[in-house]
Amino acid sequence: MSIVLHGVPIGGGIAIGRAHLLSQSMDDVVHYSIDDHEIAAEQQRFDQAVRATRKQLEMLWGSIPENAPAELGAFLSLHIMLLSDVTLTRDPRELIASLRCNAEWALKQQCDTLIEQFDAIEEDYLRERKHDVLQVVERVFKNLGGHTTELQLSEGLDGDAILVAHDLSPADMVYFKDSSVAAFVTDVGGATSHTAILGRSLDLPSVIALHHARELVREDELIIVDGQQGVLLINPEPTVLAEYRRRQRACVEARRKLSSIRNTDAITGDGTPIELLANIELPQDAANVLDAGAVGVGLFRSEFLFLGRDNLPSEDEQFEAYRMVAELTGGAPVTVRTMDLGADKSPRWLNHQLAENPALGLTGIRLCLAEPLMFRAQLRALLRASAFGKIRILFPMINSLGELKQSLTQLEYAKAELRAEGIAFAEAVEVGAMIEIPSAALVVGSFIKHVDFLSIGTNDLIQYTLAIDRNDDSVSHLYDPIHPAVLKLISYTIKTASKAGVPVSVCGEMAGDARLTRLLLGMGLRRFSMHPANLLDVKQQVLSSHLDEVGPFVARMLRSEDPDRIADLLQQLNAGPDA
């Protein structure tokens, strides 16, 4: 019987092959009581398991293949760092004593508590970090029981083997990076989980969040992984199999053609140059930016330097990270967004009360201005790094001209301090503001006299405009990037900035969606910033677009306030002038 499962598409095309099941999920934990005199020995057993886990991860980190994605080492480092977190090392020891229970049970109770806390976080990327905690905890569990912690991949896997797992950790990726596998699927994960990020980096067809794949798929069963649509087909019918083989051939040919434009300049069919940039979260990501065909970094989310740790990173530590990115990109422009922290992205060391509605609380530039010493340390680090490359500074979540002026004042203070200390920096460092709140879009004209560039954060702009939490399953279907109100705000921002000669980019998910490339071009956008995996698809749309044809068509879309009409026009726009 054929079965179809739907999950989150990670990309990589289509794979057809035989299932190879990975048995790695955590066994049910048994609880048993211990006597007072056994507590110290049980705590020692737990400590030994933690030390063994750390040693294994450090050995894996040292054996990463040279051709592995840069993200792999960063994620393994994160798992090693998690083992230093007191919530995973100290708190279970205290539970062993207070509950008089075995180490496995204490660790499970602490893990359950942490997962509940992660589930309450609204920001996608941070909420998905619960899978990293689970992966680290699972390795400690196995060391407590004396079991192997590594994936057991069969010898001599055929090239069409498809891995089916409940979850895959960065450590697991080390083991199958050089194995003959065609694709992978998992039951858990999200679009911003490390599994998803690594899947994109490895460029393998992959689908995650399938929920029941590990239960329903049998070993060596024929399956199809559609990484474009997020579909897993189990034991497909002959006609379906034939159709997917045809799609697979077409996908391979399309990807071959795409690779041929990697080094082609992004210029429209009628000769207008377009700037395609990459978004990164970690300094190590910068190593792959130019290879992906980007001309620089359009958004470096610096807040990830501040998260997952027990203390505030020093100015020198931040400086080294920003300098690394500047040097890895070989002098290409690097736009660093100042820390977008607060509310649901509050580090443990930040002592601020959680707001009832985190998205509307003390976050972004509001938190930076509320903590001027912390803010100025970051600005100093960025300015120091500007002496080693083309660093641009971007202020997040600007709401008003007053906030922008306060931010610029802090920047001038930082410059004055460095001058007095004789520390070199680029005096003419470019400064920009993010447009991600409707109020900012509507008064953007007051910003342009004070900044060198603007960047539209469409993810939050859509969320705030439509009053929709995109992480809430009950309303996420209403999250609409082509809602007429959203399009009008984006178009107004681009036109206002362009008229004043101020460059403007889009750095949200809309920039990397090839279906929206011509729409944004028609609005006047000339600078896109996206995940590197999306860059060639967008470039292809740029190369095949003629602005004299696209512009008038998009004007018709902007005049409409009927969502269905706009969707129809978008389809016609992407079909080409002969549609």
Image (tube, grey):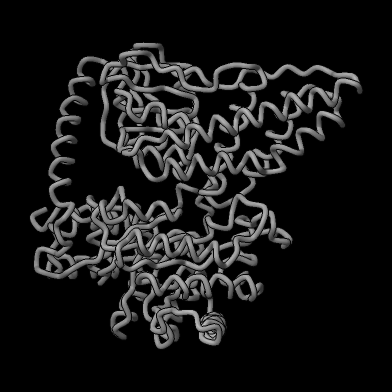
Query: For this rendering, which residue is in front, 172 or 267?
Result: 172
Closer to the camera, 365 or 92? 92
Image-based side of 490 in relation to 303, left or right: left
Task: Tell me what residue is drawn at x 40 percent, y 35 percent.
Answer: 64
Question: Outermost residue toward the front?
Answer: 422
Question: Most extreme residue toward the right, as rendered?
Answer: 36
Q: Is residue 228 visible?
A: no
In the displayed structure, 250 sits above or below 383; it is: above
In the rendered structure, the answer to whether residue 87 lies left or right of residue 182 reads right
Residue 63 sits in quarter: top left
Could you say where residue 43 lies in the image, as x and y percent from the top left?
Answer: 78, 28
For the N terminus, the image quarter is top left
Give the residue drawn at x 54%, y 61%: 317
**Residue sitting at x 54%, y 80%:** 407
Tell me which corner region of the image, top left, top right, bottom left or bottom right, holds residue 42: top right
Where is 212 relative to 346, above or below? above
Q: Position of residue 230 (x, y in %)?
A: 36, 34
- Depth check: 567 or 7 in front? 7
Q: Position of residue 170 (x, y in %)?
A: 47, 35
Image quadrant in which you'd find residue 430? bottom left
Q: Is residue 93 left or right of residue 88?
A: right
Whether residue 75 is situated above or below residue 565 in the rendered picture: above
Q: Position of residue 456 (x, y in %)?
A: 40, 68
| On screen, residue 559 above or below 518 | below
Residue at figure coordinates x 64%, y 67% from the top left: 362
Residue 310 makes an appearance in the image? yes
